[in-house]
Image (cartoon, rainbow, N blue to C red):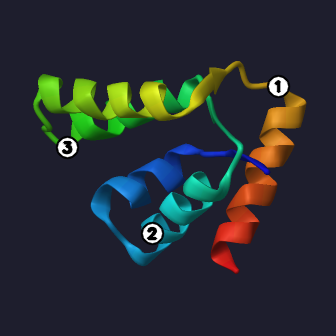
Amino acid sequence: MRIVVDSYAWIELFIGSSEGEKVRERMLEADRVFTPGIVLAEIARKYHREGVEREAIRERLRLIVETSEIIPIDEEVALESASCYEELLS
């Protein structure tokens, strides 16, 4: 199984919510984990806006890069992300 992890899913994982736990479980079950490249910018922007220290932001970005394959976003990735999001909500 392969999954695409979007910004929402990473943030839920970082805060340790029940949705984040679902993300973690799916990531552990997956053969391959993908993150669209734009997610790195979205995550950095969110935490910068919230006043999180630069090094803490860098650590979160590093975790994303080390635990998933960063991919360019295209139509197929966008559709796959939408499907994964719906699956998380169920």
Residue designated by label 1: 74
Q: Position of residue 3 (x, y in %)?
A: 71, 47
Q: Position of residue 31 (x, y in %)?
A: 71, 44
Residue designated by label 3: 50
Where is residue 36, by image quadrant?
A: top right
Q: Residue placed at 36% from the left, 33% from the top?
A: 63
Residue furthest to the top: 72
Horizontal arrangement in the rendering, residue 71 relative to residue 10 (left or right) = right
Q: CA distance from mark 2 to mark 3?
A: 23 Å
Q: Amino acid at mark 2?
A: Glu
Q: Which mark is residue 42?
A: none
Where is residue 87, by image quadrant?
A: bottom right
- Image quarter (top left, top right, bottom left or bottom right) of the C terminus: bottom right
Q: Could you say which is closer to the camera, residue 45 or residue 62?
A: 62
Residue designated by label 2: 21
Where is residue 64, by image quadrant?
A: top left
Q: Amino acid at mark 3?
A: Glu
- Tell me the element at label 2: helix
- Tell me the element at label 3: loop
Tag in front: 2 or 1: 2
- The local crowd at label 3, few if under 14, some if 14 to 19, many if 20 or more residues have their Cα within 10 Å, is few
- The local crowd at label 1, few if under 14, some if 14 to 19, many if 20 or more residues have their Cα within 10 Å, is few
Q: CA distance from mark 1 to mark 3?
A: 29 Å
- Tell me the element at label 1: loop
